[in-house]
């Protein structure tokens, strides 16, 4: 048997360090066993998927040296590797399950589903919706069918009992059928859900080992059942521990930058980032902290993964990055890295249109643009002196902007401007006064070019990190009570 592993990211938003982490372990496992590592794009949710986001996944994984053997951009014998190009495949599998009695058409409307759930709750029944709950009288089904009412295809699931899931790291886990719903497999628009597409593709692509984040454990019973229904052998499962913030919560962009692009822009080296991700729950046999991807590949053993939630600590990463910079590069090599990183023609061409009008001499350029090549800006409370806003307003402007920017999908000048303008209007603050603290947060000074342009150049994670830093500098850490108050004012806007 040839070992075949895969990562299956959905191209939404910026490429996540968690994706690189899972990719690294899949790559190591495949290489260790002389197998192949595949990249599949799970973009069946067309409203959320974006091509730039897919490209950013390719670019950032490659930047880290995590190369795949088969994938949408490199081809392979099991393609296409983008689920949106495989749409025609899934329907027949859903139909096959209907024919074998393992799935059914469900004509229930959204309102009916709400009612059914409320009904269970009222009766104090704590379980997922089951085929039994969803069933409609035969004549009602016929009526809806005749009226061409929309339907979904759902899988049959047991009412109760236990299911055993075997995991390479966790051994046999027992889960409860009680909490597993009659999962939708095919949506009313004919598109598959994650569960159907994922199982069908893993099978057709001959994936032998599924190494993924532990957040997918609860999906495993459905997947196991689908493999049984189809009569296919299930890949071996391995749920890796989730990366965590220093406060042990799940790594999320609300607390920490999670985008690989942020770490790239901060000037971390790909070698150090891969090294650090390799330390997440895994260790070298001699426990050394600094190692290259090649060394990790050579020594890899999945059983050395420990399950305690690994903490992704940016300070530790910086320390490791410093070791790499000082120990592994001569000045020639470091000069090349700096040129690649920021001091290149392409970057200059992006920045100059904004800077040129403000320049009298070439030496004006560095002070104008240095904030773009900086990490965290050296702000202090004096940086915010003389604003036309009181302290509460300042806090609100920064926090509300942060929330808006966290929710913003499309990161371009117009979209950012629209958000800021709407926010300023609803807070009854003049746009000019509203933007001043953001200038300081993003560029360190108001004497800079448009804050929207700067945010586009810095990217979402770096922009958010700077606003968060400004908020903490100007107003101190926001406590729980304060946060509640802010949330209330925000939802009242
Ligand atoms: N598309 C899923 C994701 O976004 C894949 C999960 C899996 O590996 O099964 O992570």
Image (cartoon, helix red, strand yellow):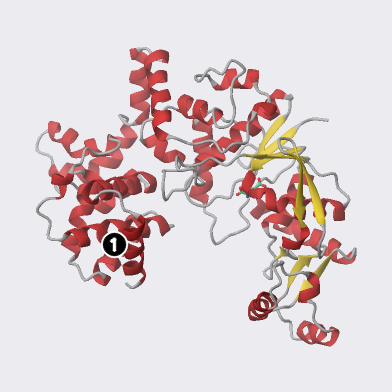
Picture coordinates of residue 445 (x, y %)?
16, 45
Q: Nearer the viewer, residue 464 or 369?
A: 464
State whether residue 32 is above or below residue 390. above
Q: Residue 338 sits in which quadrant?
A: top left
Picture coordinates of residue 242 (x, y %)?
57, 42
Q: Residue 422 sits in which quadrant?
A: bottom left
Picture coordinates of residue 349 (x, y %)?
29, 38
Task: Say which residue appears at 89% left-offset and 50% top-offset.
Answer: 231
Q: Would you say 431 lies left or right of 246 here?
A: left
Q: Would you say 464 lies left or right of 226 here?
A: left
Task: Say which residue appears at 37% left-offset and 27% top-offset.
Answer: 340
Q: Residue 115 sits in which quadrant?
A: bottom right
User: Element under label 1?
Assistant: helix
- The answer, for residue 202, to whether it is visible in the render is yes
Task: Say which residue appears at 63% left-offset and 50% top-offset.
Answer: 42
Residue located beneath label 1 in the image: 420
- The answer, for residue 68, to whether it is visible in the render is no
State whether residue 292 is above or below residue 483. above
């Amino acid at each position: 048997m040839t070992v075949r592993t895969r990562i299956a990211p959905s191209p939404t938003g910026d490429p996540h360090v968690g994706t690189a982490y899972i990719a690294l372990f899949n790559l190591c496992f495949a290489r260790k066993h002389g197998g192949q590592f595949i990249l599949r794009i799970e973009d069946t949710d067309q409203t959320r998927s974006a091509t730039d986001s897919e490209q950013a996944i390719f670019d950032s994984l490659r930047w880290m040296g995590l190369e795949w053997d088969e994938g949408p951009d490199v081809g392979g014998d099991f393609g296409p590797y983008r689920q949106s190009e495989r749409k025609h495949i899934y329907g027949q599998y859903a139909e096959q399950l209907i024919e074998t009695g393992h799935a059914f058409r469900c004509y229930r409307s959204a309102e009916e589903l709400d009612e059914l759930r409320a009904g269970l709750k009222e009766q104090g029944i704590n379980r997922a919706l089951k085929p039994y709950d969803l069933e409609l009288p035969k004549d009602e089904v016929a009526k809806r069918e005749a009226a061409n009412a929309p339907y979904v295809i759902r899988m049959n699931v047991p009412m109760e009992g236990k299911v055993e899931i075997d995991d390479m790291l966790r051994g046999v886990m027992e889960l409860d059928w009680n909490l597993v719903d009659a999962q939708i497999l095919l949506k009313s628009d004919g598109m598959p859900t994650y569960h159907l597409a994922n199982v069908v593709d893993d099978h057709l692509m001959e994936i032998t080992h599924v190494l993924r984040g532990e957040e997918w454990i609860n999906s495993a019973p459905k997947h196991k059942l689908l493999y049984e229904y189809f009569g296919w052998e299930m890949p071996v499962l391995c749920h890796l521990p989730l990366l965590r913030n220093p406060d042990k919560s799940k790594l999320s962009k609300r607390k920490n930058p999670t985008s690989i692009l942020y770490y790239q822009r901060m000037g971390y080296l790909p070698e150090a980032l891969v090294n650090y991700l390799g330390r997440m729950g895994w260790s070298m046999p001699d426990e050394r902290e600094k190692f290259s991807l090649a060394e990790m590949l050579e020594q890899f053993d999945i059983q050395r993964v420990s399950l305690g939630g690994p903490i992704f600590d940016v300070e530790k990463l910086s320390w490791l990055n410093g070791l790499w910079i000082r120990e592994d590069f001569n000045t020639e090599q470091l000069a090349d890295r700096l040129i690649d990183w920021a001091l290149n023609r392409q970057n200059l061409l992006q920045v100059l249109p904004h800077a040129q009008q403000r320049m009298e001499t070439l030496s004006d350029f560095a002070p104008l643009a240095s904030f773009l090549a900086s990490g965290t800006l050296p702000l202090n409370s004096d940086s915010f002196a003389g604003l036309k806003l009181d302290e509460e307003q300042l806090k609100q402007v920064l926090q509300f902007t942060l929330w808006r920017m966290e929710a913003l999908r499309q990161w371009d000048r117009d979209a950012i401007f629209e958000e800021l303008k709407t926010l300023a209007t609803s807070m009854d603050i003049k746009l000019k006064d509203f933007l001043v603290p953001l200038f300081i947060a993003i560029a360190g000074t108001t004497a800079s070019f448009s804050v929207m342009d700067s945010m586009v150049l810095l990217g979402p994670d770096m922009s958010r990190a700077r606003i968060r830093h400004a908020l903490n500098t100007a107003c101190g850490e926001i406590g729980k009570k304060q946060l509640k108050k802010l949330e209330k004012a925000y939802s009242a806007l």
